[in-house]
Image: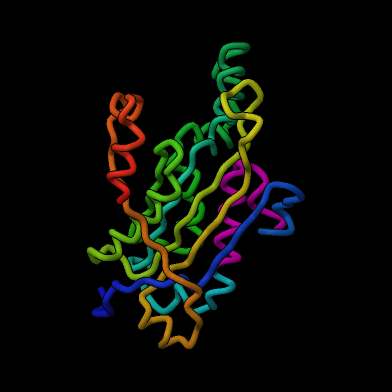
Amino acid sequence: MSDEPAVGLVVTGIGTVGADGFDFRTALGRHGYKYLPAASQYFLAAAKRALAQAGPDALAAVGPEERGAAVGTNSAAVALHHRMDSTVTATGAGDLSPVTAPYFSINLFGSRLATEHDLKGFNLTFTSPRVAGLEALQMGQRALATGRARRLLAGATEEALPEGEPGAYTSEAGAVALMLEPEPAARGRGVAALGRVGVRSFFLPPKVAASAEGAERAAALLR
């Protein structure tokens, strides 16, 4: 591992992707992405844009074992899982597509990112409802602070919820990716620090949150 401190992280690249008008062929290339779930395509495209802004040496400056990824999602796999369930109940598991069947595991939605960019430090997926994207940032930064890696690609990706799911009419589809690195590394490469991010989380038991004092208890934690 490098002696470069993984503290004082700054954002050097930001990539965003929306589902409207998205074409994986234009964003990623014509071959090799057709059968990836949409949420995986979104995050790959967002990461590509973040890395383009951060510069070609953002990752190349460190070895593969010093690069990490953290992605959060709430609904990346819901529509796919619905289609899988319908197939199994209608005609049997033998009719599941062999190219999409592995994605019953939510952890695989970010695996292509690690493969393409040789991210061998860690590759984490977070699915806590509503705060998964924030947890990806928090835990990714914590991993760097403890020496697990020196560069971090972190963000969130979502696919729209299928009709009938709670919240379907307000669900969103797309992805955001951030490239984070130690501030001295960014200065050494001569790139601008776009900003800093920080996340802190607290646990409020559901029964307490639903009680008459729930809002005040949450406010107290935030204060």
> Is 55 placed above or below 161 here?
below
Instruction: State the quadrant of the N terminus.
Output: bottom left
At which x and y percent is residue 161? 61, 31
Q: Nearer the viewer, residue 81 or 215?
A: 215
- Residue at 56%, 43% (x, y): give it: 158
> Is 116 placed above or below 74 here?
below
- Residue at 45%, 35% (x, y): give it: 105
Describe the colour scheme in one phrase. Answer: rainbow
At which x and y percent is residue 31? 69, 54
Q: Magenta stretch containing residue 181, yes or no?
A: no
Tell which residue pokes out farthest to the top in this image.
90
- Tally of numbered discs: 0
Q: Quadrant of residue 47?
A: bottom right
At which x and y percent is residue 216? 32, 37
Q: Nearer the viewer, residue 193 or 49?
A: 193
| 185 lies left or right of 21 | left
The magenta span reads 29-50
| 194 lies left or right of 152 | right
Q: Quadrant of residue 168?
A: top right
| 223 lies left or right of 134 | left
Q: Nearer the viewer, residue 145 or 109?
A: 145
- Residue at 57%, 32% (x, y): give it: 98
At which x and y percent is residue 184? 35, 83
- Residue at 36%, 56% (x, y): give it: 199
Tell which residue pokes out farthest to the right in this image.
21
